[in-house]
Image: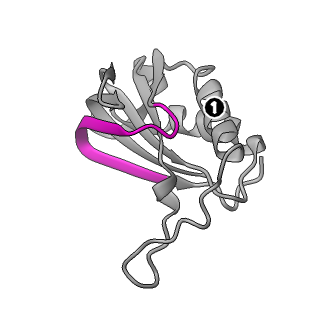
Amino acid sequence: MKAVIQRVLSASVVINGVEERSIGPGLVILLGVSDTDSLAICEKLARKCAGLRIFSDENGNLNISAEENGYEAMVVSNFTLYGDAKKGKRPSFIRAAKPPLSVDCYNRFVEELRKTELKRVVTGEFGADMQISLVNDGPVTIVIETDDWVA
């Protein structure tokens, strides 16, 4: 799996042009699932994301997690994280997982993230047309890839 984690002051997602979901300070997590992923890694990745020490302490050091601050998170599925643009100008998405694996991993990740000490976890909608607005804080953006992880 691949997660792009952004530290935000606020964020919102509009789903299919109608429904809006939003968070205050916390994390926006774009989540991509590859065709070689499994459900076994979801818990570890969720704990890692919630526990990332990417918020400033009293000395300005990145030393506090979203969990410790009681912040929120927004998770949005994003198969394009596995876009391969090495050849030509049209990315190939052959490594992106297809349903049911992609849906199952996304749902399990969200389920595991909700078990952490985050204040609240909201989501986009898998496979929907979404527009995301956010105020990136810092900016702080971290990319985590689980390709070599053991569950």
Look at the image and tell me whether residue 57 can be seen. Answer: no
Q: Which quadrant of the figure has residue 66?
A: top left
Q: Residue at x 53, y 53 (%)?
A: 144
The x and y percentages for residue 101 are 71, 46
Name the amino acid, label 1.
Asn
Look at the image and tell me whether residue 1 can be seen. Answer: yes
Q: Which quadrant of the figure has residue 22?
A: top left
Q: Residue at x 64, y 54 (%)?
A: 97
- Does 56 sit left or right of 123 as displayed? left
Q: Residue at x 54, y 65 (%)?
A: 93
The x and y percentages for residue 129 are 38, 39
Q: Is residue 73 above or below residue 80?
A: above
Nearest the eye: 36 or 148: 36
Q: Residue at x 51, y 71 (%)?
A: 92
Q: How many marks?
A: 1
Asked which secondary structure carries label 1, the reply is helix
* Residue 134 magenta-highlighted: yes
Of helix, strand and loop, which mostly describes the magenta segment?
Answer: strand
* Residue 97 magenta-highlighted: no
Q: Which quadrant of the figure has residue 94?
A: bottom right
The x and y percentages for residue 44 are 68, 39
Nearest the eye: 99 or 8: 99
Q: Which residue is mark 1?
A: 107
Nearest the eye: 56 or 43: 43
- Does 83 sit left or right of 12 as displayed? right
The residues colored magenta run 125-143
